[in-house]
Image: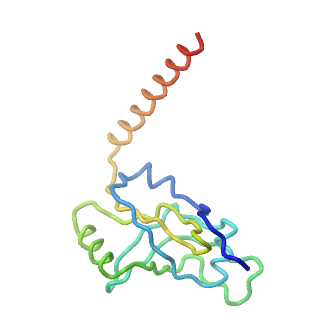
């Protein structure tokens, strides 16, 4: 079977963009079991409540739910088990230093297939306060009004 080329997005974490300011993104691999990969290819993954933690120089995705593969057998893993992320040691040390700062956290933003390999986009995020969320909503509304006015003007 030939390798597939390109990127196919499997799941995104829209809630992360609502609750956090995403300052930097990183790409990393996922260490998965075979039935988890098959389930993810079907799009049966949920990133909504997931986060990443650094333990003993390794990085893990916690709370990432991968539904059991329906045609699997006794080797189906626990849907909520911590998934190890594959990154270089230097990158992990850099991330650990940044997470040590006040208010920063690592959040999985997207899971996708890249050249037939599962990849995860990891975001260095800072939490939003309620007034920040209101400011973002107001800016989106203002931009929408500007677009409407421009489209009405073009139609005339």
Return the residue found at the far bottom.
Answer: 74
Q: Is residue 59 left or right of residue 12?
A: left
State whether residue 150 is above or below residue 1.
above
Looking at the rendering, in which quadrant would you find the N terminus? bottom right
Foreground pick, 128 / 90: 90
> How far across and how far down the image is residue 152, in percent?
56, 15
Looking at the rendering, in which quadrant would you find the C terminus? top right
Q: Is residue 135 left or right of residue 140?
A: left
Foreground pick, 85 / 49: 85
State whether residue 11 is above or below residue 77.
above
Q: Residue at x 46, y 81 (%)?
A: 84
Q: Residue at x 55, y 20 (%)?
A: 151
Q: Residue at x 49, y 71 (%)?
A: 63
Which picture quadrant has residue 100? bottom left
Foreground pick, 61 / 123: 123
> How far across and how far down the image is residue 147, in percent?
50, 25
Foreground pick, 7 / 62: 7
Question: Total label count?
Answer: 0
Q: Residue at x 74, y 87 (%)?
A: 73
> How far across and how far down the image is residue 27, in percent?
44, 68
Which picture quadrant has residue 45? bottom right
Q: Is residue 68 left or right of residue 107?
A: right
> How far across and how far down the image is residue 35, in percent?
67, 82
């Amino acid at each position: 079977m030939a390798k597939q080329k390109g990127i196919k997005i499997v799941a995104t974490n829209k809630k992360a963009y609502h609750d956090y300011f995403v300052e930097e993104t990183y790409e990393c691999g996922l260490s998965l079991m075979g039935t988890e990969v098959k389930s993810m290819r079907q799009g049966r993954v949920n990133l909504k409540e997931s986060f990443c933690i650094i333990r003993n120089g390794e990085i893990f995705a916690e709370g990432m739910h991968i539904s059991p593969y329906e045609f699997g057998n006794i080797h189906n893993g626990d849907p909520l088990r911590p998934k190890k992320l594959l990154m270089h040691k230097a990158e992990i040390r850099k991330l650990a230093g940044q997470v040590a700062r006040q208010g920063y956290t690592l959040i999985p933003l997207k899971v996708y297939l890249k050249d037939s390999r599962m990849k995860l986009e990891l975001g260095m995020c800072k939490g939003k306060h309620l007034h920040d969320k209101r400011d973002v909503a107001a800016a989106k509304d203002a931009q929408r009004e500007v677009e409407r006015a421009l489209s009405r003007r073009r139609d005339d």
